[in-house]
Amino acid sequence: MKSTTRMPRVARALGVAAVFVLASYARSQDELPDAAEALQAAIQLFNEGDFVGARHALNQIDPQQLDDADRTTHAEYLQRAELAVSMFQKAEADYEAALLALAEGRVDDAQGLLRDIRDNAFAAKETVQAAAAELRKIETAPEAAPTGGADAATPQEPFDETDPDITRQRRSLRARVLTREAYQAMDAGRLHEAERLFGQALRQVPGYPEAIAGRERLAQHELVESDARALIDRYKERHAIAWQRTVATYRQAEREVRDHVLSDRYNQANQVLLRARQIVEAGKTFADPVARYQALRHD
């Protein structure tokens, strides 16, 4: 009797627990935004100019949870976000390069870069404003006399080379540009070029933190690549040895078959021949190139 009275209580307790768990799960699901809502939030970030945030948000969305129309929209905005981030970063790089060009007296180069920023639809508002201000300074500066005549004016350097502060500023700008180009080269797999650019940056500003960090990352990358190559070389070497062993074992079986045939032991010859074929098939994965396996198999 005691056990029978306890069973309903246990059943009721389990039932209440199950209801509680299901309700908690349903509530947690309601709190999570669905894929369509997340897509609209990502699009809003994009429209507000937060291209990096939009790209991150779009990458968090599983397209399989979207309907066909939203899936198409998701792919379109992801492509646009990738382009926007790339162009945003280009504008930042162009501005640094323009400042360096101005510091080195390359006014035409600077103007071209600043105009590119002005026409870049994805450049940061502050960068566009700064570029426009630099363009106004250039366009309102007194024009130099035409070159070629006796009275031609000598172009003036925009900065005084003897001013140590200006020299440090120029070197810092050059180090920033070189370091950025080095990172781009490294990301593109041009490791020797990246090493050269990091070295140039450090010659401009010894101990430049970004260039040092880049060199450390490059060294790690080369170490991983070297380890990978070494692993592949060891892998190939082991396969070559295993294939040599396969060929040697097959040749030994081949001689045994010949001996059995010459002695009219055809049953034994068939058994050894079957074993020889199994040896070749087992060593197939070690053949490099596969033509070696095919040639041995046809023997």
Image: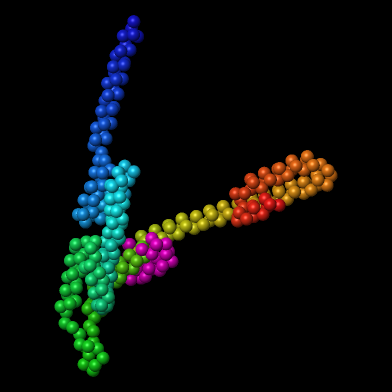
> In this view of the protein, can residue 283 be seen by the observer?
yes
Query: Looking at the image, which is closer to me, 98 or 223?
Result: 98
Residue 57 in the image: state x and y as whole percent.
28, 49
Quadrant housing residue 190: bottom left
> In this view of the protein, can residue 169 be seen by the observer?
no
Tell me, yes or no, whether the highlighted magenta stretch contains residue 200: yes
Would residue 93 appear left or right of 223 to someone viewing this image?
Answer: left
Residue 268 in the image: state x and y as whole percent.
78, 40
Task: Name, please, the residue furthest toward the right.
Answer: 263
**Image color mode:** rainbow
Residue 220 in the image: state x and y as whole percent.
43, 57
Across the whole image, how many numbered discs are drawn on residues? Answer: 0
Task: Name, please, the residue furthest toward the top.
Answer: 1
Name the residue located 27 percent from the left edge and 75 percent from the top edge: 109
Residue 290 in the image: state x and y as whole percent.
61, 54
Name the residue located 21 percent from the left edge and 64 percent from the top edge: 127
Would residue 113 appear left or right of 277 to someone viewing this image?
Answer: left
The rendered magenta stretch, by its main secondary structure, is classed as helix
Task: Name, please, the residue furthest toward the bottom.
Answer: 150
Query: Looking at the image, which is closer to me, 275 or 133?
Result: 275
Query: Looking at the image, which is closer to me, 133 or 210?
Result: 133
Above or below for 26 versus 219 = above
Name the residue located 28 percent from the left edge and 47 percent from the top edge: 69
Q: In the picture, which quadrant includes the N terminus?
A: top left
Quadrant housing residue 219: bottom left
Above or below for 116 versus 144 = above
| The magenta segment | 184-210
Query: Looking at the image, which is closer to me, 226 or 235?
Result: 235
Tell me, yes or no, whether the highlighted magenta stretch contains residue 114: no
Name the residue located 79 percent from the left edge and 42 percent from the top edge: 266
Above or below for 219 versus 39 = below
